[in-house]
């Protein structure tokens, strides 16, 4: 089963901004209880969406430059990127159903 990609400052450009398919990025922190709550959901989505949407996780404590670049002020924050651009973002814990709804609204029911 496909797993979420661990993103960092070295692979963010290639994996997210240069991706040929849309990318859902989970900006999270290890100290954040809601982030822990959605951890399994993110992994499930990575498997369910394999080939349609790439799913990645970025620890904001380890990569503050990226956190600041995308104005992350609440965790978890989910940002959908397509063609290197931010399409949609949501802040706070979300269920699998809510995240799929976000993706379908932004991408035209591809899922």
Image (spheres, helix red, strand yellow):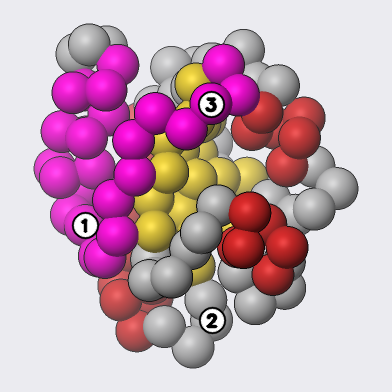
Instruction: Please name the residue shown 47% across and 32% down the image.
Output: 86
Question: Which type of secondary structure does the marked residue at label 3 adopt?
Answer: strand
Instruction: Please name the residue shown 43% across and 70% down the image.
Output: 73
Instruction: Please name the residue shown 19% across and 13% down the image.
Output: 109
The answer to whether residue 86 is magenta is yes
For the residues labelled 3 and 1, the Cα–Cα distance comes to 22 Å
> Could you tell which of marks 3 and 2 lies nearer the N-terminus?
2
Using the image, determine if residue 82 lies above or below residue 80: above
Q: Are marks 1 and 2 in contact (CB under 8 Å)?
A: no
- Where residue 36 appears, as percent x and y from the top left, is 38, 75
Extreme-right residue of the structure: 10
Label 1 crowd (10 A; few <14 / some 14-19 / many >=20):
many
Q: Quadrant of residue 89?
A: top left
Badge number at residue 94: 1
Label 3 crowd (10 A; few <14 / some 14-19 / many >=20):
some
Q: Is residue 44 visible from the viewing direction of this image?
A: no
For the residues labelled 1 and 2, the Cα–Cα distance comes to 17 Å
For the residues labelled 3 and 2, the Cα–Cα distance comes to 26 Å
- Where residue 66 appears, as percent x and y from the top left, is 67, 57
Question: Which type of secondary structure does the marked residue at label 1 adopt?
Answer: loop
Q: Is residue 38 visible from the viewing direction of this image?
A: yes
Extreme-bottom residue of the structure: 31
> Could you tell which of marks 3 and 1 lies nearer the N-terminus?
3
Q: Quadrant of residue 39?
A: bottom left
Magenta-colored span: 83-107
Using the image, determine if residue 27 lies above or below residue 21: below
The answer to whether residue 96 is magenta is yes
Front residue (pair 49, 85): 85
Q: What residue did someone put label 2 on?
A: 30
Front residue (pair 73, 59): 73
Q: What residue did someone put label 3 on?
A: 85
Instruction: Please name the residue shown 55% across and 52% down the image.
Output: 70
């Amino acid at each position: 089963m496909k797993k979420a990609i661990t993103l960092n400052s070295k692979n963010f450009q290639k994996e997210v901004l240069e991706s040929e398919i849309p990318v859902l990025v989970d900006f999270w922190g290890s100290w954040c209880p809601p982030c822990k709550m959605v951890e399994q959901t993110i992994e499930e989505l990575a498997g369910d969406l394999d080939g349609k949407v790439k799913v990645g996780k970025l620890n904001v404590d380890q990569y503050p430059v990226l956190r600041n670049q995308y104005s992350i002020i609440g965790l978890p924050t989910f940002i959908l990127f397509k063609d290197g651009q931010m399409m949609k973002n949501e802040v706070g814990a979300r269920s699998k159903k809510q995240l799929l709804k976000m993706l379908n609204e932004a991408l035209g029911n591809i899922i």
